[in-house]
Amino acid sequence: MSRMAFVISLGVLLVPRIAAGCVIMAKPTVLDAYKNADVVVIARAISVEHVSDQSETPLNASRVLSTTMEVEKVFKGNLRIGDKMTLICRYHPTKRASVNNYFINMQKERTKELIQTATSITIVGAQCFHTTDVHIWEPLSKTTAELFYIEPGQSGQGLFKDWAIACGKREGFNFHVIPKTFKDAFDTILKVNELS
């Protein structure tokens, strides 16, 4: 009997004997990207908002929260020269994506399909922000797959355990917390996903 495994991480999806780094489908052509874009402009950065020096470094290692851009040329959309737009960090849990990107939507749909059919799911490098990252955590809440959560920090472990229990999952049966870094848990990840 083959065991389907699925690993969620910030950058890599692993399935038995297959590895794909952030790419599940072909990139669109420039023309397709243009057709699917709401706005196409040339703009220059006029200001940048950073996380305070006293704050923890964000998970994506970027201290940039937002960048204000000033439009210099408009090819498509309802912006005008001189308009200002604020681009937010896409990976900050309190922010939402500033554009509707069909490639990202396709990735979300593919992730949902993989979660529904997996028997084992290993989660690495994804904090349990279930109220903002609904596209990840809602399908995980409904899956019958066994969940393995790799997280060295106690606060992250606590968030995940609280979420899993609220979803009706039982520790040691439906979910397991592995209190290690990715590097230290690598052999465990291979073992639970039958990849070694």
Image (spheres, grey):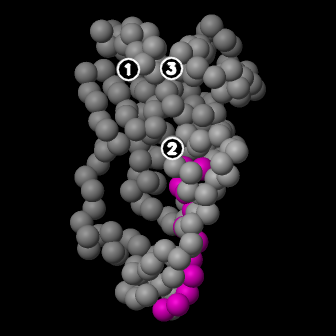
Q: Where is residue 135 in the image (x, y as percent from the top left)?
A: 56, 44
Q: Does the magenta stretch include residue 86?
A: yes
Q: Nearer the viewer, residue 157 or 60?
A: 60
Mark 2 or mark 3, which has the lower sequence index? 2
Up-down relation of residue 5 to residue 45 (above or below)? above
Q: Which of 36 and 66 is in front in this view?
A: 66
Q: Do the residues labelled 2 and 3 touch (CB within 8 Å)?
A: no
Q: Which residue is drawn at 35% across and 27% down?
A: 14
Q: Which residue lies furthest to the front in this view?
A: 53
- Observer-side mark, 1 or 3, equals 3
Q: Which residue is drawn at 35% across and 42% down?
A: 22
Which residue carries the number 3 mark? 181
Compute the Cα span from label 1 to label 3. Answer: 23 Å
Q: Where the N terminus falls, by quadrant?
A: top left
The boundaries of the magenta stretch are 81-92
Which residue carries the number 1 mark? 4
Q: Which of 36 and 79 is in front in this view?
A: 79
**Three-letter code for the amino acid on which mark 2 is drawn:** Asn
Q: Position of residue 151 (x, y in %)?
A: 57, 22
Q: Is residue 135 left or right of residue 154?
A: left
**Three-letter code for the amino acid on which mark 1 is drawn:** Met
Confirm whether residue 139 shows in the render.
no
**Three-letter code for the amino acid on which mark 3 is drawn:** Thr
Which residue carries the number 2 mark? 60
